[in-house]
Amino acid sequence: MNSRRIMTFFSIIFVALFAAFIVWPRAAMTQQQQTSQKSQQTPTIDEYQPKSTLVTKEHKIERAKFPFIDIHSHHWNPTPEEVDRLVKEMDTINLRVMVNLSGGTGEELKKTVAVMKGRYPDRFVVFANMNYDDLNTPGFGKRVAARLEEDVKNGAQGLKIFKNFGMDLKYGGGERVHVDDPEFDAVFEKCAELKIPVLIHVAEPSAFFDPWDYRNERWQELKEFPGRARPPAKYPPFETLMTERNHLFAKHPKTNFIAAHLGFHGNDLARLGKLFDENPNVYVDIAAVLAELGRQPYSAHDFLVKYQDRVVMGKDIYEVNEYKWYFRALETRDEYFEYYRKRHAFWRIYGFQVPDDVLKKIYYKNALKLVPGIDARSFAD
Ligand SMILES: [Zn+2]
């Protein structure tokens, strides 16, 4: 080994020792510090899951106090096995009659009626839907009315209109079908003649029409499902849809309309009250908007008492274990409890307990009045 090699050798040893005793421990310390610092950093909205320390009364209500009708459910082409299972589950929560809004039309409707009502006549109701395949052929509205009449003969007890109506549905030339499009007048007049209700979903929560920024209260849902955003470049504004919808309600006063999801006025009950006052033919369901009522328990209670003849029970996405939130909100005064779908509500909700006579109206009496042909005998009084 010459002296240069010896120098290199010792240099390497020195660097290694320096790294081992001086630099590495420092780096390690920094890592430790970083970890402790990180725990003090601002968490993301997903990371922040505070456990409530509130100790207060809790009522776990697994079964509705009275038998009820779910006016807003979806079961596309169910099999006999699915229907059998459904009835068993419905019995566990006191769900007496389920309204399947997804009956379709024509042969599809007949099949759905047969598999549900055919086998459990007093447990199911099926609503028909419109088929838009021949939208661009003149005389469309009249043909839909005729098809609906046929569907009702085949067992349909109402018409459900999905949210594409007014937003995504367009004529061949690209023009949007407006909610109050005169082409459909024949359909709504037919519903009045047949004495069947129209359950209609118009627009979406107003926040979906607003910019997706940190001030948007549905930020999380729009992050999870960007397709739910309704940007102005592609969609009419929320207010345009409301104006068209209200015009539709006003021009068919003999037709009963059930505006789905509190008509998307759950965040402005005074506005919904005004809609009720102006249109005696308008009703709402509470499907999938329970968190709106649950965040304003005093207003919700007073509103439901005042408009007790106009509100019907509904759930939307069927999941037997989620109904208990509705029971708890409607039947108790439990406070500050977690909602079942965080993307709808990052806030906790409160029970707004309505009196029994109001509860009965929401659970079944109003639906019995609106939907023809439900056997009322299975409901007490
Ligand atoms: Zn629905």
Image: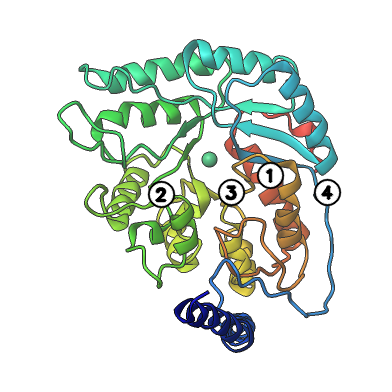
Which mark, by number, is residue 63? 4
Crowding near the residue tagged with mark 4, few <14, some 14–19, many ≥20 C-alpha atoms within 10 Å:
some
Does the rendering let one see residue 176? yes
Q: Amino acid at mark 4?
A: Arg
- Residue 189 image offset from top left, x and y in percent: 37, 29
Residue 228 numbered tag: 2
Lower position in the chain sequence, tag 3 or tag 2:
2
Per the model, the C-alpha gap separating discs 1 and 2 is 34 Å
Of residues 8 and 273, the one drawn nearer to the viewer in this rendering: 8
Residue neighbourhood size for the residue with mark 3, other residues' Cα within 10 Å, grouped as few (<14), some (14–19), many (≥20): many
The reply to whether discs 4 and 1 touch (Cβ–Cβ < 8 Å) is no
For image coordinates 51% across by 54% down, the residue present is: 262
> In the rendered structure, which disc, 4 or 3, sits on the residue that comes first in sequence?
4
Q: Is residue 74 left or right of residue 57?
A: left
Name the residue tied to disc 1. 365
Residue 351 location (% of width, % of height): 71, 67
Could you tell me which residue is drawn at 57 percent across and 25 percent down?
Answer: 76
Which sits earlier in the primary sequence, circle 4 or circle 1? 4
**Does label 1 or label 3 sit earlier along the sequence?**
3
